[in-house]
Image: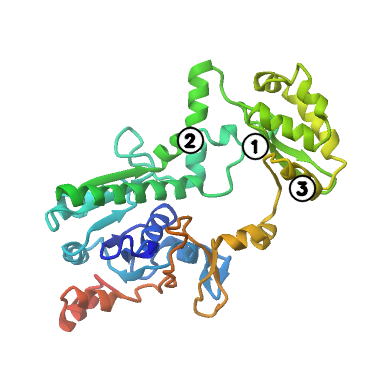
Amino acid sequence: MIENTLSGYRILDLTQNVAGPYCTQVLGDLGADIIKIERPGSGDDTRAWRPLEVSGQSSTFLALNRNKKSICIDLDSAEGVAVLRQLTASADVVIHSLKPGSAESRGFGYEDLKACKPDLIYCGISAFGESGPMREMPGYDPLMQAFSGIMSVTGNPDDDPVRVSVSLIDMGTGMWAALGIVSALLQRSRTGEGADVRASLLDTGLSWMTIFVASYLASGKLPQKMGSAIGMTAPYELFKTSDGYVFIAAGNDRLFTKVCEALKCAELALDERFVSNDQRVTNRVLLHELIEKLTASMKAQDAVQALRKVGAPCSELNNLSQVLSNDQVQASGMISRLPVQGALEHKVVATPLSMNGQRSALKVPPPALGADTLLVLKAHGYTDPEIAELRKSQAIA
């Protein structure tokens, strides 16, 4: 079963916000034992990201922190760092999202914790990476969308730049970090050696710009905002209908012929201005106008039905309510029930992986702040008097 993939691996999660927690949630869904280490008193910043909430809990925090335990350690104190070092001795992975140099200055950099666990997998997530003049600068998803150029190619041609609404850089960085950690664990199983894994928001943003970078380097021309379209093929964009929009994606000549068949405009497939992708891209504006004259008189569902009947790739433009009620989405198993305190019908989006036709069945609700501090410390050999002393010094909570 997929939820047993990482069973037996223990991960100390020092991250907060989106990228790191998304990474460790994926690993937790795969069966890893995730111990989330949070600041006493406030915890992960997303616990306070409201007013969108479920029964008094931040909906953002709930979306990113299932299948984890929570303990509170003050990592600004020597006593707290000593606790972290003791926990590391029985961990497989430590992951943090501190700016480069911050963990090292407090005594829990890679070399520090490697002394506690020689085959440790250590992962650091940062904004701009480990080198360069901006290495210590903070960063958030929309900031990095601006810096990496994503905003410069997003939106309609005559409008101001906009960000992609989903946190694609944060969540993408979490995915890369998870892949790096799993790869390091596989390598360790062969060599017995640990690894220092790094991921950054900048690297992820640049990787998402791969096609634009290639096009620019090949042509010397800056890519422009194109709304829903892309520069390499046409038609490949949204078209108005009488009650909404339909996206038509004709990635080759054969599919363009099918689009023309579905919309009853077979003559366009024979028109010398549109007979090849090169020609269609060159005459994109005219082609869009001709197709939209046809779709504008149709309802979106009728257009989609006609296009799908002949095998032409297309989609209606859905809002989130329509997405969640769609039969295909419901059949996918991606939306599942995860009761939380005060909200028994609370639902979450699953990790987008399946194995042998099954998704992970692990569904432990996100923890209350510090809910597992006592349990985890006792499991690591701390006695009641030692725990009481740590609480007294405020090293833990």
Q: Nearer the viewer, residue 90 or 70?
A: 90
Vertical side of 318 occupied by 162: above or below: above
Most extreme residue toward the bottom is: 384
- In the image, 238: left or right of 182? right
Kindly identify which residue carries mark 3: 305
Residue 17 image offset from top left, x and y in percent? 43, 57
- Crowding near pointer 1: few (<14 within 10 Å), some, many (20+)? some
Going from N to C along the chain, the mark reached first, 3 or 2, is 2
Asked if residue 140 shows in the view, the reply is no
Q: Quadrant of residue 369?
A: bottom left
C-alpha gap between disc 3 and disc 2: 41 Å
Scheme of image coloration: rainbow
Q: Mark 3: which amino acid?
A: Gln
On residue 155, which mark appears? 1
Q: Secondary structure at mark 1?
A: loop
Say which residue appears at 36% left-offset and 51% top-offset: 178
Helix, strand or loop status at disc 3: helix
Q: Nearer the viewer, residue 236 or 163?
A: 236
